[in-house]
Amino acid sequence: MKKTIAILAVSLFFNAFLNAQSITGNFNQMHNESIKLEGFDGFKTYPISSSTTDEKGNFKLTYSAADYGMGYLVSKNSKPFIVILNEEKIELIGQSLNFIETITITKNQENQWFEQYAKEHPLRERALSAWNYLEKMYAQEPLFSVQKTASTNILSEKKRIKAEDTSFLVKLPKSSYVSWFIPIRKLVSSAATVAQYQTEEIPATIEAFRAIDYTDQRLYKSGLLKESIENHYWLLENCGKPLDAVFAEMKKSIDAMLVNLVKDPKKFNEVTTHLFQLLERHSLFTASEYLALNVLNQNHCTLDSDLAKQLESYRAMKKGTIAPDMVFDPSFFANNTNILSKLSDSKAQYTVVVFGASWCPQCKEELPEIASLYSKWKSKSVEVVFIGLENDKNTFIDFAKNFPFPSYSDLKKWDAKIVKDYFVFATPTLFLLDNTRKIILRPNSVKQMDAWVDFTLKN
């Protein structure tokens, strides 16, 4: 039995060895220098292999079937040189990774196609931009609008350039990685251009983004996963529609993304976490709330505990919910002039509960701003209660002792009962409560809170 296992182990080793592929080449200006090959795995990169060039600049790097997709070569102080890692040997020559323009792929058809397209496509794009400029000039300027033949020729040349680009892509073998990668890369990189100069293409581009399958392993190995999400939602945010319409489009995109993701728990957690954090950073809280509630209602996937805590904040602490009361220990207030026994003891018509910390850069900016606005808010029956996520009493007192509003910390940081009761996962976090502790707003900034005061309590 042991002999059989040993033979099997040796067989697997040699099969893996035989299946390994290599990148060989010569960089004639790199002598005895380290070269690394790295690959992509979702939102992360990882090392595949490394080598050192010899006295003549020759080198060899290896990779396995698990690395198939996009990779890049890099050396000290150089820009990355992108390659397609497939089942064929890759050979290249050049001066150095510091001079990428000198590098040529001498062996590996897919990489040669990729190299050709990478050189030709930008030229076509520049030509199209020039023709678009001229097309508008010949259509709008009286000096040129009479030149019908020129306008026709411009339109004809634009069609020819687009057809040439499409023809190149159509001819690529459907089974090749490059035939999948180039259109996705082209889509992802087009968002800014489409939003600024080709607005008529915005609907089709958004639909193309929605068609991306976020469980596709090719996407995870492409280095485009992060950009495909961020550029998609950047385009939605900058599509020129009113904010309500933007949020409606974002909800459609979230629904489209989740269709396949619910079948893959690992990717589901990774992608939804990244998207949720992206929406939060951009203060797109209507969309992040929709994503949170949608994800929490999925029965097919087990959520990562950290993600679940973040998302639960929107379900447990959404507008209209009665927030938990807070019971305070008087000894944990920053000073003796603003002490409450319970949050419900506040006599104000409204209370802004602010979760923050001395170690939070944004809190250092926003809490003094709240302090400067406090007298105005207080005059309109808006109280402020600051909950500090701290673990050192002196640090907390130094930070909060001059705030004119009640400032409290039980020094348990994220483990504080108050923090857990309110499902706080980031600082600063603000809740606006009425005198029954009903949540009427989750302000995304001090400016939004102050605008609410000015607009709602103007009399």
Image: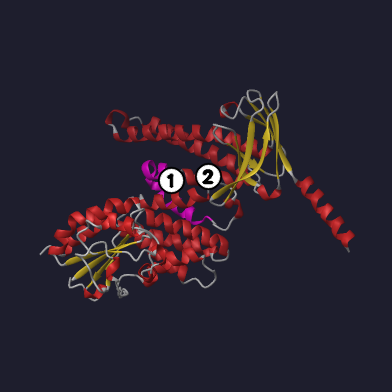
Q: Is residue 203 above or below residue 453?
A: above
Give the label on residue 185, or none.
2
Query: Is residue 61 found left or right of 151 in the rendered image?
Result: right
| Callout 1 secondary element | helix
Query: Is residue 458 found left or right of 334 in the rendered image?
Result: left
Q: Please name the residue shown 18% across and 66% down the image.
A: 382
The x, y position of residue 213, in whole percent, is 55, 57
Q: Is residue 319 something that shows in the picture?
A: yes
Q: Which residue is mark 1?
A: 191
Characterize the magenta stretch by its predominant secondary structure: helix
Q: Is residue 90 magenta?
A: no
For marks 1 and 2 on the same chain, the one whose residue lies earlier in the sequence:
2
| Residues rendered magenta in the picture | 191-212
**The disc labelled 1 sits on which kind of residue?**
Ala
Badge 2 crowding class, 10 Å Cα cut-off, few under 14, some 14 to 19, many 20 or more, is: some
Q: Please name the residue shown 50% across and 50% down the image.
A: 226
Q: Is residue 36 above or below residue 252?
A: above
The x, y position of residue 167, in whole percent, is 58, 40
Q: How is the image coloured?
A: secondary structure
- Write down the quadrant of residue 428 in the picture: bottom left
> Relative to the observer, which residue lies in front, 22 or 313?
313
Q: Please name the residue shown 63% across and 41% down the image.
A: 84
| Callout 2 secondary element | helix
Distance in Å between CA atoms under marks 1 and 2: 11 Å
